[in-house]
Amino acid sequence: MSALLTVDNIGISFGGLKAVQAFAVEMRAGDLRGLIGPNGAGKTTVFNLLTGVYQPNQGIISLGGRRLNGLAPHQITAAGMSRTFQNIRLFGDLSVLDNVRIACHLRTRSGLSATITRAGGQIGEERAITERAMELLAIFGLGDRVDEQARNLPYGDQRRLEIARALATFPKVLLLDEPAAGMNPQEKRALRELIRDIRRKFELTILLIEHDMGVVMDICERITVLDYGQIIAEGTPAEIQKNPAVIEAYLGTADAPGVRKE
């Protein structure tokens, strides 16, 4: 099977700092891959490169055979790649429902004039958008909170709302940036099942940044490890757990004080 997402030796520098160097990965449809590394390793920078927040100084990014270099973030989202953020970026003053409805508008066809005149086609699209948003919120257990302001949701619910909003754009590839951050153990267990479920239900390819090794090792089929902006290891969870370079750079040595075995 050919790759859906191909990242070929991308890199970016900020002044004299090489934040990411020669990053390369291929993901087929349906893959679930983890991207891990110490703080400052360049993980979120990779996500920013993939989604057009930054433009790479070198290398090529392609999705379904289409080159994404030079595209703006909204164009990359329209091409089929969506993301969540390490620091939640919901529209806090808007309702839970409207946070998802906004994302649904990426796929609408009605123009400004149809919206102003409330033409029949535009009304139909708005109805379909609301139905789509309600379906997503029900999947994420938020169907009874649609009228609440997003800022008033508990932290775990805000995380789920952000994923629901990302799915509203009908992505082929979903990038999750530390989705378990700030969650308690019960919420993390539920998140693992949720990620598995949405991958199957929405036929997604998922690239996941996460510091919780229990989550990563449990749900990811392959893992890429970054350190100082460079890939130092790649393999299955079992291979990564035994890799000496990973143990030293990310997990710490086995006899180091304060290292917790997952």
Image: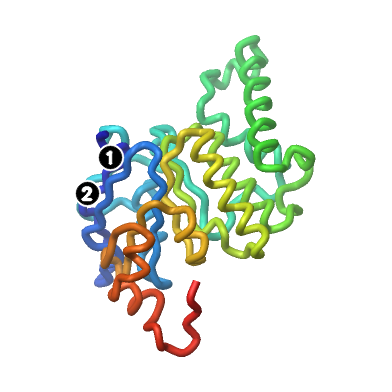
| Residue sitting nearer the eye, 185 or 171 | 185
Query: Along the line of sight, which residue is nearer the eye, 52 or 139?
Result: 139
Q: Could you tell me residue 89's position as x and y percent?
A: 58, 53
Q: Residues within 10 Å of mark 1 (few under 14, many from 20)?
A: some
Q: Which residue is mark 1?
A: 62
How many numbered discs? 2
Identify the amino acid type marked 2. Asp
Residue 210 horizontal/vertical position (percent): 48, 61
Residue furthest to the top? 120
Q: Position of residue 187 (x, y in %)?
A: 66, 58
Q: Identify whether 185 is placed above or below 175.
A: below
Q: Give residue 6's quadrant in the image.
A: top left
Residue visible at 45% across and 60% down in the picture: 217
> Disc 1 on helix, strand or loop?
strand
Report helix, strand or loop for mark 2: strand
Mark 2 vs mark 1, CA separation in Å:
9 Å
Asked whether, in this view, residue 37 is left or right of residue 191, the answer is left
Residues tagged 2 and 1 counted as in contact (Cβ below 8 A): yes
Q: Is residue 117 visible?
A: no
Residue drawn 60% across the image and 35% down it: 102
Question: Image height check: is 35 above or below 250?
Answer: above
- Residue name at image x 51 percent, y 60 percent: 215
Q: Which residue is mark 2?
A: 8
Is residue 148 visible in the rendered structure shown here? yes
Residue 173: quadrant of the picture: top left
- Three-letter code, disc 1: Ser
Mark 2 and mark 1 lie on one chain; the one further toward the N terminus is: 2
x 66%, y 52%: residue: 158
